Image: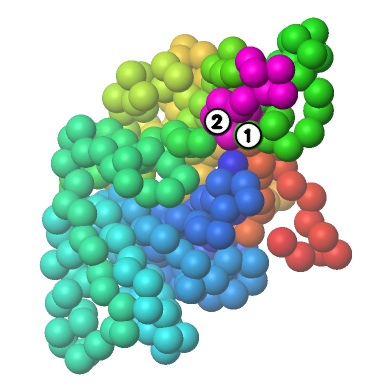
Amino acid sequence: MELQFLGTSSGTPSRARNVSGLALRAAGSKHWYLVDCGEGTQHRILRTHYSPMSLRAIFITHIHGDHCYGLPGLLASAGLLNRTEPLLIAGPPAVERFVRGVMDSTELRLPYSLEFAAIEPGWTNAALPDFRVEAAELSHRVPCFAYAFTEKSIERRLDTAKLERDGIASGPGWGQLQRGEDIDLPDCRVARSADYILPGRRQRKIIVAGDNDTPSLLAEQARDAQLLVHEATYTEEVLQKVGPGPQHSSARATAAFAQEAGLPNLILTHFSPRYQQGSNGLSMAALEAEARAAYTGNLFLASDLQRYSLDRQGVLTQVPLTNGTP
């Protein structure tokens, strides 16, 4: 499972960070998925290997502008590229009103159809080709959700030692057994696929959360997840000065939840623009130090265009840039 951040700032962009957007893809799939689409997202996409033509679905966590103002431009550009495949847009009901309002007022006509899904607590989509998607309600100033993506396809592994022990020679029949097909053997025996398939590995699951001041709301979803992507807008000290009004989380609160939930991998994102790399004042280093003091797992602080890979064992790694590019 592959992730690439298209924006990691909260509220407004900075010189180094765009506002929220995250690309998600199952390894080897021709489709990809977008979570949130802040202003300028399509410009970030131009710097990746992703294309609006192969985008299968967009998931909007909530209606705040830094998470959805990029939608009209991206949809229009896909139309100018002559996209014809339908596109799913999932989000709170206000998202459809926003998109249709912009389309009506600007007379935007698309050569492909939009399929809107109004998200509510307990919403599930099992029809997408790569992932089963579930929504979990969060705590923010407007209706806001997290999306849990669980892979649907688990590779079948053959018990080759048992095949050899039973005198079933390597050949095309092994491929049929791996695909779940029974085969007739030359000696009139029938080899049943179920007898030669090893137990499957654990399905990978990623949770991508929107804005949220109560990470513990994701406790149930986190039970069988390998990765949480969650906001850490402030350090705890700044959060206490700002007060509860904005309804955001601190790095400490998010990290402490991930530790308690036993999540092996955590990516923090959605940082206030006040935090700068290498700053003598409010720095990214302060956010990282606060998180590491509360969490002993595999921790990353996201940056724009950075890519990550979650392998079959559930280990998250940062993908190195090639020739300095994503």
N-terminal-most mark, 1 or 2: 1
Specify the quadrant that holds the C terminus.
bottom right
Q: Residue 74: x, y in percent?
A: 40, 75
Would you say residue 156 is visible in this rendering? no
Quarter where residue 261 is shown: top left
Main secondary structure along the magenta-highlighted residues: loop
Q: Are marks 1 and 2 in contact (CB under 8 Å)?
A: yes
**Which residue bears the numbered disc 1?**
176
Inter-mark Cα distance, 1 to 2: 5 Å
The residue that appears at 70% across and 32% down in the rendered structure is 173
Magenta highlight on residue 180: yes
Indicate left or right for 79 with 137 as reference: right
Q: Nearer the viewer, residue 197 or 182?
A: 182
Q: Residues within 10 Å of mark 1 (few under 14, many from 20)?
A: few
Q: Where 1 sits versus 157, above or below?
A: below
Residue 160 spot, x, y in % from top left: 77, 18
| Secondary structure under the numbered disc 1 in the rendered image | helix
Who is closer to the viewer here, 114 or 18?
A: 114
Q: Residue at x 32, y 46 (%)?
A: 127
**Residue bearing the label numbered 2:** 181
User: What is the span of residues highlighted in magenta in the rendered image?
Assistant: 177-189
Q: Is residue 89 above or below residue 204?
A: below
* Type of amino acid at the residue the image marks with label 2: Glu
Q: Is residue 103 above or below residue 118?
A: below
Most foreground residue, 100 or 160? 160
The residue lying at 17 percent from left, 52 percent from top is: 118
Q: On the rendered image, what quadrant is the N terminus found in?
A: top right
Please state if 22 lies on the left or on the right of 212 as rendered. right
